[in-house]
Amino acid sequence: MYHKIVLPVDLNEENSWNKALPTAVTLCRTFGASLHVVTVMPDFRMPLVGAYFPNGFAEKAHEALSEAQHKFIQEHVPEDIQVQSVIVDGSPWESIIKAAKKVEADLIVMASHNKRKFADYVLGPNAEHVVHHSKISVMIVR
């Protein structure tokens, strides 16, 4: 039923994956699907933002994030799961949807945070935006 499953992960926030990852792994094993771990990096290349960072900062940040994501995969994703590391820039919910489209995923499995931060009230929760704007199935794990 599912062939490619996207799992958005915030490497600094264990709540973004601690319940969603086991669910995604079970689904991968059940359907023989591949797992695509997506991490969103803020877009440092925007002129307004980029002016505050030294030259080459975005590339160094991308390298560091890539290393951290590979370490996460090595430590948390079982070896029998076919996994791909995906790093995208920009708004979290838009980037998750774009990454899912790019890898031609047919399911997004993601966590929903119960504790709302101030940014959630201003911008709206990422999970809610993904559910409303995604053209593929989205499973929210609480």
Image: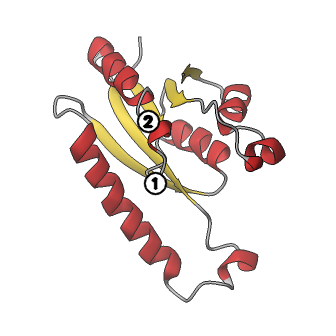
Reading the image, the residue beneath label 2 is 17
Residue at the left extreme, as displayed: 79
Identify the residue at horizontal 16%, vertical 34% (top origin).
79
Reading the image, the residue beneath label 1 is 87
Where residue 53 appears, x then y in whole percent?
60, 84
Where residue 30 appears, x then y in whole percent?
30, 12
Query: Circles 2 and 1: CB distance less than 8 Å?
Result: no
Q: Amino acid at mark 1?
A: Ile
Where residue 117 appears, x then y in whole percent?
70, 45
**Is 23 situated left or right of 102 in this image?**
left
Q: Tell me the SS state at disc 2.
A: loop
Where residue 129 appears, x then y in whole percent?
72, 34
| In the depicted structure, whether residue 115 falls above or below residue 65 | above
Residue at the bottom extreme, as displayed: 54
Q: Residues within 10 Å of mark 2 (few under 14, many from 20)?
A: many
Q: Quadrant of the C terminus?
A: top right
Q: Tell me the SS state at disc 1.
A: strand
The quadrant holding residue 64 is bottom left
Identify the residue at horizontal 49%, vertical 37% (top origin).
15
